[in-house]
Image (tube, rainbow, N blue to C red):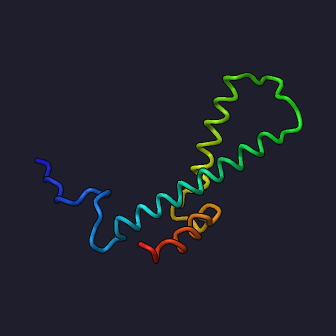
Amino acid sequence: MIAPLPATPPPSAPSSNGPSTDQQKLEQAAQAFEAIFVRTMIGAMRQASLGDDLMGNKGSDEFRDMMDARMAEEMTQSKGSQMKGLGIADLLIAQWKDKL
């Protein structure tokens, strides 16, 4: 017979040891802002291309836009690495955390 697992709180539930929900919301908003900023930067770089795409069409443009958006999100995610995006989110958190 398989023994039942011990009851643990769901990972999304805030714990008394973790940051407050306001702090979590601030971190999410700052990271989302940084992702939007990076996405805008990637879009500007795409517009500055020096020539036309030989195989370009409306469908490939749509997929390129989706890929750019996903790349921007991945670039700004901090997954335990030393690099945390561009640091814009960290600056926003440092500026606004005292106002919570």
Image side of residue 53 versus residue 28, left or right: right
Question: Is residue 88 shown left or right of residue 23?
Answer: right
Residue occupying image coordinates x 65% and y 62%: 86
Residue 99 x %, y %: 45, 74
2 or 58, which lies in front?
Answer: 58
As displayed, is residue 86 above or below residue 43? below
Quadrant of residue 75 within the rendered picture: bottom right
Q: Residue at x 59, y 70 (%)?
A: 91
Q: Which residue of the protein is positioned furthest toward the right in this rendering?
A: 50
Q: Quadrant of residue 76?
A: bottom right
x, y percent for residue 88: 62, 64
Q: Is residue 7 left or right of residue 86?
A: left
Residue sitting at the far left: 1
Is 43 placed left or right of 48 in the picture?
Answer: left
Foreground residue, 65 or 22? 22
Report the residue that reaches farthest toward the front. Answer: 99
Q: Which residue is depicted at the point 23% across and 60% down?
A: 9
Residue at 65 percent of width and 29 percent of height: 62
Residue 2 appears at what percent x and percent y?
Answer: 14, 49
